[in-house]
Amino acid sequence: MTRILVVDDEPQIVRALAINLRARGYAVSTAGDGAEALTVAAAASPDVVILDLGLPDMDGVAVIAALRHSSAVPILVLSGRADSVDKVDALDAGADDYVTKPFGMDELLARLRVMVRRSTPEAADEPRVAFGAVVLDLAAKRATVAGADVRLTPTEWHLLETFVRNPGVLLSQQHLLTEVWGPGYETAQGNLRLYVAQLRRKLEADPARPRHFRNEPGMGYRFEP
């Protein structure tokens, strides 16, 4: 049974999420503030964390950073903050997806299903891939640049794997969005631009002049090893 930790200080949201998630077979733990969230996460080892950024005791970005010190658990941010700066801060800290309040339950559940699928272990016979100073161990989900480990979120890994499994192939934005985020996200180009920028920042020698993750204006992206 997939374990979900819901972190929010609004009781009605926690209750609605808990009811909907349990009705679909998830095991649900809850927390009302950041300190409780970290305690519950350490004890319950959730498979996914749904996290509000506006917590009463600490900022949600600080909770994400604290979780990332000890866990690669997928984190779905749920927040009333629609500003792109807040989204970038959350994703930089290690979040995997971002849903703005008010939200549709069907949309949130769809994003959750995608995150659960992405985090499911795959077969261990995956290849190693090298380009530039980067070495990827797809089985271990480990990336190094010039021998130094680079942490990638589950969403970044999924996007990166889609690229490296299709070297030299022009991948449309719609294809990448459907592959990584799932059906219904074909027009979410902002998500794709943000995550491609994250990969460039972490893996390109010069993110402003990318060699490996190339944009084909009006068409899509191409990975060049």
Image (cartoon, rainbow, N blue to C red):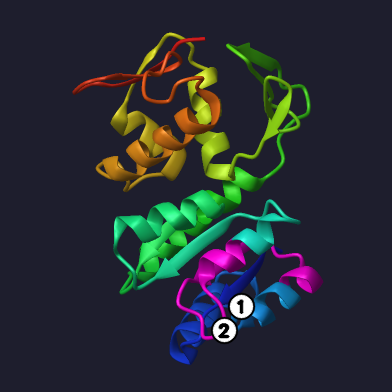
Q: What element carries label 2?
A: loop
The tally of labels here is: 2
In this rendering, is residue 127 above or below 103? above
Which amino acid type is marked by label 2?
Answer: Asp
Residue appearing at x 75%, y 77% in the figure: 39
In this rendering, is residue 209 above or below 95? above
Q: Which mark sits nearer the N-terminus, 2 or 1?
A: 1
Instruction: Determine the image quadrant of residue 40.
Output: bottom right
What are the residue bounds of the magenta stretch? 41-64
The residue that disc 2 covers is 57
Residue appearing at x 36%, y 45% in the figure: 183
Position of residue 52 in the picture relative to residue 29 (left or right): left
- The residue carrying pointer 1 sits among few (fewer than 14), some (14 to 19) or many (20 or more) residues within 10 Å by Cα, namely many
Q: Position of residue 121 (x, y in %)?
A: 72, 41
Are the two marked residues, 2 and 1, in contact with CB atoms closer than 8 angstroms?
A: yes
Which amino acid type is marked by label 1?
Answer: Gly
The residue that disc 1 covers is 34
Residue appearing at x 46%, y 28% in the figure: 200
Observer-side mark, 2 or 1, equals 2
Position of residue 175 in the picture relative to residue 37 (left or right): left
Q: Which of 35 and 41 is in front in this view?
A: 35
Q: Where is residue 96 in the image (x, y as percent from the top left)?
A: 51, 51
